[in-house]
Structures are given as C-alpha cells and as structure tokens.
Image (cartoon, rainbow, N blue to C red):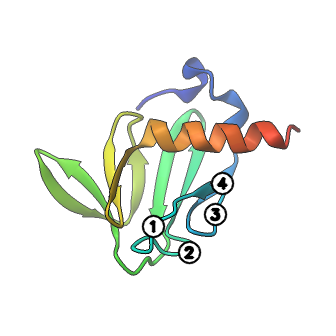
Amino acid sequence: MTNTKQDGNKRLESRTYIIGREGHIYINDPTVSKQHAEIQVVNGEVYLRDLGSTNGTFLIKNNRLVPFHEGYVQLHQPIVLGNRQYTIQSLLEIAGAFAAQFPD
C-alpha cells in the first residue's frame, strides 16, 4: 500500500472526508450524489467507500470500469465518480486544502 505520510499528507491521517456535491471534497457534477463516497487515511493507507451513491463508484483497471464498494486503494488509482475521472491523489489534494483551513 502507499504510505501517505511519506507523501506529506500527515495532516490527513485519521480523518474522514465526504466526496460529493455536499462534501468536504466538493464535486460540481449532477451525476455525483450529494454524499457520494468517503475517503479516509488510516495508518498511512487510503480507504475509499461508496456511500450508496446513485451512479456508483468505479475503479479503472485495464481500461475497464470496475464497480467499487469499499476497500484500500493506491494514490495513483484512477476512479470514476459520476461522469468524472479522478485519482485518489487528486482527491486527497482537495482534502488537504480543506484540512489546512481547519488546523488541529
């Protein structure tokens, strides 16, 4: 697994971020649910979970969309939420900007 502490994301550790139209990681897309998925950094590893979204969460593996419900993912893993493609790292960068607004 990818250790996010080594990638400078220590401030993200042990926090949960909601991805969606009404989430910490805001996605302005009508095909993304209000609370589409959540992402957590646990012991330096990234855990992604779909929150019962209408259009689902998908990993891209071998140029194919694979439905994804929950589990650990790599930083450079491409995913699709609604009609948009992201990497876990790009979502964590948005989460990091959010976390920086609310330091411990």
Q: Which residue is mark 1?
A: 29
In the rendered image, the residue lying farthest to the top is 6
Under circle 3, the secondary element is loop
Task: Measure how far apart labels 2 and 3 are at the Cα level.
Answer: 7 Å
Marks 1/2 in contact by CB < 8 Å: the verdict is no
Spot occupied by residue 91 in the image (x, y as percentages of width and height): 51, 44
Mark 4 crowd level (few <14, some 14–19, many ≥20, 10 Å Cα): some
Numbered disc in front, either 2 or 4: 2
* Residue shown at 20% from the left, 60% from the top: 66
Spot occupied by residue 57 in the image (x, y as percentages of width and height): 35, 64
Q: Which residue is mark 2?
A: 34
Write down the quadrant of residue 76 in the picture.
top left
Tell me if I can see residue 43 in this picture. Answer: yes
Q: Which residue is mark 3?
A: 23
Under circle 2, the secondary element is loop
Which of marks 4 and 2 precedes in the sequence? 4
Q: Which residue is mark 4?
A: 16
Task: Measure how far apart labels 4 and 1 are at the Cα level.
Answer: 21 Å
The front one of 79 and 97 is: 97
**Type of amino acid at the residue the image marks with label 2:** Lys
Answer above or below: position of 25 versus 69: above
Under circle 1, the secondary element is loop
Which quadrant does the C terminus fall into? top right
**Type of amino acid at the residue the image marks with label 3:** Gly
